[in-house]
Amino acid sequence: MRRAVLGIVLLLPLLAPAAETRKGNNPCEPPIEQRKSLRLPGKETRELDTPCDPQRLAPPRMKPQKLPAVPDRWRIVDSLPGYSNNILDPYHRNVLKADKPVMGDDWFFLFTGISDTVYEPRRLPTPVGIQTTGDADQIDIFGQGEQTTFNQNLITEFALIKGDTVFRPPDWEFRLTPVFNFNQTETEELRVLRIDPRAGKIRTDDHAGLQAAFADYHIRNVSPRYDFDSVRVGIQPFNADFRGFLFQDNQPGVRFFGTRDNNIFQYNLAWFRRLEKDTNSGLNDVGEPLRDDDVFVANLYWQDMPVLGFFTQATVVHNRNREDDFFFDNNGFVARPASLGFEKPREYDVTYLGLNGDGHFGRMNLTAAAYFATGEATKGVFVDQPTDIRSWFAAAEAGWDQDWIRYRGSLVLQSGDPDPYDDLEEGFDAIFENPIIAGADTSFWIRQAVPLIGGGGVTLSTRNGMLANLRPNKEHGQSNFTNPGLVLAGLGTDLDLTPTTRLSFNFNHLSFMNTAVLEAARQQADLDPDIGWDVSSALIYRPLAIQNIVFRLSGAALLPGDGYKQLYKDETGYSVLANLTLTF
Amino acid sequence: MRIYGCLLLVLPFLVTGCGGGGLDDGGCDGGCVDNNDFLSAGDVQNVMARSVREADARGANATVAVVDRVGNVLGVYRMPSADTSVTITSPYPVDGGLEDLAFIPASLAAISKAVTGAYLSSEGNAFSTRTAAQIVQEHFNPGEVGQPSGPLFGVQFSQLACSDLTLSNSDAQRGPKRSPLGLAADSGGFPLYQDGTVVGGVGVIADGQYSFDADLSDDDFSLDEVIARAGAQAFPSPDNRQGERITLEGKVFRYAEMEPGDTRTSGNPPALGSLPGSTVAVNGYFNGTIQAGTVLGQPASGIRADNTFFPDRDAFVLVDGTNTNRFPPTPSPTGDLTQNEVQILLDQALAVAERSRAQIRRPLGTSARVTISVVDSNGVPLGVVRGEDAPVFGTDVSLQKARTAAFFSSTRAAADLQSGLTANYLQSTLSGGAPVVDRTIQIGDYVSALRNFLGDNTALANGVAFSDRAGGNLSRPFFPDGITSAPHGPLSKPQGEWSPFSTGLQLDLVYDNLVGHVAFVAGIGPSPGTGCSNISRATGAGPVDPLANGTQIFPGSVPIYKGNTLVGGIGVSGDGVDQDDLVAFLGVHRAGQRLGTINNAPDSMRADRIVVDGTRLRYVQCPFKPFNDSDAQNVCQGK
């Protein structure tokens, strides 16, 4: 949720609606700016396909009036009766909400506070402790899988902004986002939460993370429509594509970005060096040394390409990893290298070539992504020799709105490695995914990290991750291109029952692209690729019909297919999320 | 480009992926061996010549040993300046056990390494001494702190000369032969293969140290390893059987830290006689004349197919010089078990094994091949049976395990251990050509330590049912296993005194006999007799050593009961330890269903009732996906 909010903040400039076009008295006359062939701020309007009806009423025309000059707009309000400052009220004029300068004429301060509370009962395959068990008579591998997690994030965001924020991008922005976390997880088995079984079945942890700390400088405007070049330095949110398939994170870096041609083109040139995460909160841990892992990004967004209302983005992302030391997470489990295969430290260079799109074709909403990953690693997973990486990923989600109903269809293909013993790694993996597709974290598969019990200290897919990538976890692990890959095909629907209530359903079928890697890891023959059906439902309730109070309740079940049954007990997994988000 | 083929298949259906490889990979899976699969004397010379040539090319001086699959020493070759003695040492400072003993004949180190290569391997798996190092340390993998110990923790102290199961030179070429230092973890011991089947092993020592690799994360170089690998050039293990193609807990077994091409020499070797050095006789192992090896499965090897007791199984038995089964199903001399009960126990356990998914064998989908031993409550062997092509090491180990379960579950265990036994640790070097006792360990102290640890003054006398897994929990340098902040198990040595060469009660029980045998071979001491533990337990059928081939401390055994009465133990070895547990536990369960007379320990008597500081002992752990012919999971619960 936190990431979603930050993502929205980032994307706001992209999504801001074009300024309304004023028209003359004759309803069929072209817009005034076209008549004068002037370029003015705002997006150009294209002629509607339908012919103008000369009988329709012309819009009213404002007669210009002389007003006394005032230095700025907020001082107008100052002089009006009935307006007062109340710093506790985010909906009216508030100096904390950048409604009025705090210094000089154009230094604004913005505070945002978000409380994000999650309670999560779940059941997933869980091993008994190897060297001890909670109960007597536990004489097999698979234990009781019921678990619960309570997670509380308090997100505080402080921004100092220089500039007239309404009409053009600010000149300077300084932003700091400390997040305070408390989490508690309870399991039925020992050694799930901490490597030391004496630590018991309940883990309580807290962390203060820094999810943003950047300075943003508006270098210059390059056109009358405020196309611009900016640079942002520090810990900042970034999403390499539209749906968080490759790299969506808050990491320290330097990013040049801007627009051209009246915002038709947007670009990013960025370098990130990743922070270590706190294991249990998933937040940045600035107390740890930076990871020896760099992400270089160059991308270009092309608006209305190929059709009006559709963004196309092309990107090149390079991930350079030089993490050649053992790293154990806060719970004592080895995270780098993964406890899989040779378990030797390895380094890699991977270049991702991506083509992404998001928008709509007529009435059909569509998001699509395609990546090709190529690179090399100093060692493979199951081979003790240098390897080449060649893998791919494709995803698409189409939606169709019919009144208050949206129908969705999703397809995700992740290449899998057909031969773990050759020098070619053909499974796709991302850098740091936060996928928003097929129900996102409503889905069992995406939300839950199912351990590959008996097959290494890795999970089938990470928590809040979709790729079947056999990583120890998303927070610390390295990318793993020796993996089984995934085929996800899903149908879903969102029902906007009332302005305050949305009900969603998702039916996803999952299977591995190729089970050869799993068979090697588990020393098990003829694994069926069928993972099963991931069936979920979500209710979103916004009592005030605004985003400041959002309650979400979702439940998902994984109905195991043949392959899943061969890996684990024949038991339906579930994942329930109760989530309350309060935003100031 | 199988991926793309898969994709094409996938697209029309949008819902499915592709499965992996099948069962048949064109290699051997346990039934390949025929009458031609043995090392000839010429083959032995070939192996030794290649090793000597490689050592020479590297300016090294090596001692090379070649054995057959059942441990017959076919040749020992010593280069002119090779060390005559080597030092046992861990790569970190340790005080106690075998550490720092500097009078170990190099020939014994080489033999132990060769035996290890041969004994751990099969048509389904090629393991080396490096593999052994990976699976006997305090974490698996070594270096992955917090992980429990290696799955074969303690296996190094098996195949001992004091064992009543292993044989010596006086038993012609019948095996399984003893290994003078037990199994080796020092790099430089490999199996030798011919036509996909194991025909022997080669062991080399050239660096003066009998040690092990404790860091698996680096790219290691071992002089011993490269010389041994050169020796194996003409008899290489199949690529798709090497440990690196086999996983346990997702981790591959390490076979070698080198590629075959990393040797400096290759091609047909010169005649052995033209190379520096000569064969050297080793007292009790090799008379100086290079000889041919045996064919596993033929009576001369001491192991042949059963033709009497297990008609429905691929069963093999141990035989003596008259081709008579050495360990046929036999009634207990004290009446614990009948001959029929023993036979059904072995048969049912073998039946479980034949259904089980092998954890250490290729191709995937083959069944576990293990050795099963049954003893009575006094540790008297009542029957031993092997699956075809089961790794040979499991023969002695299965008997150790059966005895360990029966012994520690007995109410007489404490008294036996407190009967004045000692381990007399020797000084690292000789004094006046003779070993000198450095300090004496009282075996009985382990009982006190255990009772203090458990807070139970009746422990080892109260009849709690100890499986090998449960006893093993108490025999690790950390309790709970693998947790470095935890205290040591009461049957283990503490940190600073623990290493694979100093395990605690397991070694101390056999120390005098193990080291005494080494001293005998070195010509500096008398030959100790047969029987490893020196315990003499009075029974209705006379005194017995209930741990006559030592104890074992990794999983794969359970005690056997009639109602609440201990009547024996069953031990299984040769595949993954969870498989070993499964075969032992389910074997007893199913035999009990058949017979109605025997059973696993009643739940309330099992050691998993014992909890120390919140850490509960384990009884057994049956594996995931236990059977090849079923997707059933958790098949042991409730039994």
Image (cartoon, coloured by chain):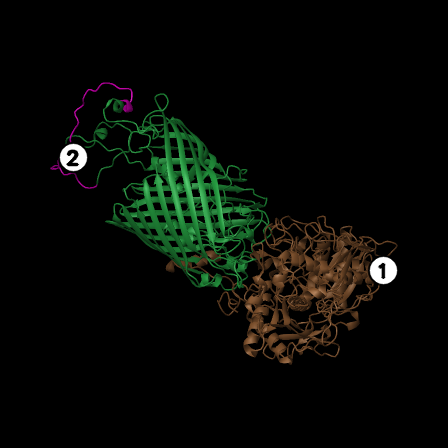
Chain colours: A green, B brown
Using the rendered image, report if marks 1 and 2 lie on a common chain.
no
Chain name for mark 2: A
Number of numbered discs overlaid on the protein picture: 2
Q: Nearer the viewer, residue B88 or B23?
A: B88
Whether residue B209 sits left or right of residue A386 in the image: it is right
Secondary structure of the residue carrying tag 1 is loop
Q: Position of residue A416 (x, y in %)?
A: 48, 54
Sort mark 2 into few (<14), some (14-19) or many (20+) by Cα contacts within 10 Å: some
Query: Looking at the image, is mark 1 or mark 2 nearer the viewer?
Result: 1
Q: Which residue is mark 2?
A: A28
Q: Which residues are magenta?
A: A49-75
Q: Which residue is mark 1?
A: B524
Q: Establish if B533 lies above or below B211.
A: below
> Picture quarter containing residue A19?
top left
Instruction: Identify residue type, mark 2.
Output: Cys
Q: Position of residue A8 (x, y in %)?
A: 36, 39
The image shows residue B16 at horizontal and vertical percentages of: 41, 60
Q: What is the residue that sits farthest to the top in this orientation? A: A68
B142 lies above or below A583 = below
Separation (CA) of disc 1 from disc 2: 116 Å
Please indicate, yes or no, whether residue B194 appears anywhere in the rendered image: no
Residue B473 appears left or right of A12? right
Q: Residues within 10 Å of mark 1 (few under 14, many from 20)?
A: some
- Asked if the stretch drawn in magenta spans residue A54, the answer is yes
From the viewer's side, name the closer residue of A552 and A452. Answer: A552
* Frontmost residue, A423 versus A541: A541
Secondary structure under tag 2 reads loop
Quadrant in the rendering for residue B97: bottom right
